[in-house]
Amino acid sequence: MHAKRFLDLTLGSVLLTLASPALAAAAALTALRRPRGEVFVREVRAGLEGRPFTLRTLPVHRFRLDALSRLPHVVRGEMSLVGPAPLPPGTPGEAAPWRRRVRPGLTGPAQLRRGSGLPWDEPLMLDQHYVEHHGIGMDAALLLRTLLVRLRAG
């Protein structure tokens, strides 16, 4: 098992265990508010080697539960904690060979810079740079930065 997958599996499992009570409560509240429908939003995304998978997200942005609701995908190996954003098949940049070498992530350089006024192509460049230079040290730094950004956001 690669170190990155070990980090995803262990930290992802711990985070999922810690977040489960909040996710269960949010899912129950969402189910009560929705008239007979799905609690999770389902979207097809391209994963490792371009393989499609169905991404399930709880549509609750409070406390970033929407991102935490994607943790089962990390534990199953469809996603990683850190990596390029999961794109729908056919989206510009989705078929890039460099993107298909890694699992999409819950967070990454481009996701952290979202809303910063970057030119449209810079997120792809940030993701490509990450894929070409990633390692456990970079992942740890991006996870810490994500945590700090989320704590400041409230």
Image (spheres, grey):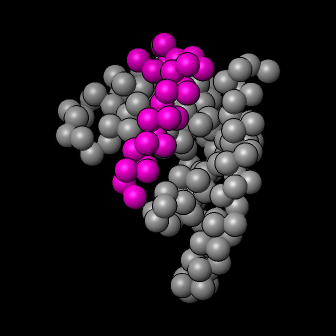
| Quadrant, the N terminus | top right
- Name the residue furthest right: 1
The segment highlighted magenta reads 129-154
- Looking at the image, which is closer to me, 31 or 88? 31
**Residue 23: x %, y % from top left:** 64, 65
Q: Say whether residue 81 is left or right of residue 6.
A: left
* Secondary structure character of the magenta stretch overall: helix
**Residue 56: x %, y % from top left:** 61, 56
Where is residue 57, by image quadrant? bottom right
**Residue 12: x %, y % from top left:** 69, 42
| Quadrant, the C terminus | bottom left
| Residue 55 among those drawn in magenta | no
- Looking at the image, which is closer to me, 31 or 154? 154
**Residue 3: x %, y % from top left:** 71, 20
Q: Residue at 60% x, 85% y: name it.
A: 32
Residue 12 appears in the rendering: yes
Q: Residue at 62% x, 35% y: name it.
A: 80
**As displayed, is residue 29 above or below residue 67?**
below
Q: Residue at 54% x, 26% y: name it.
A: 139
Residue 101 appears in the rendering: no
**As displayed, is residue 107 above or below residue 4?**
below
Q: Residue at 53% x, 52% y: name it.
A: 67
- Looking at the image, which is closer to me, 77 or 36? 77
Q: Say whether residue 103 is left or right of residue 20.
A: left
| Residue 140 among those drawn in magenta | yes
Tag count: 0
Where is residue 43, by image quadrant? bottom right
Where is residue 5, by image quadrant? top right
**As displayed, is residue 101 above or below residue 53?**
above
**As displayed, is residue 38 above or below residue 35?**
above
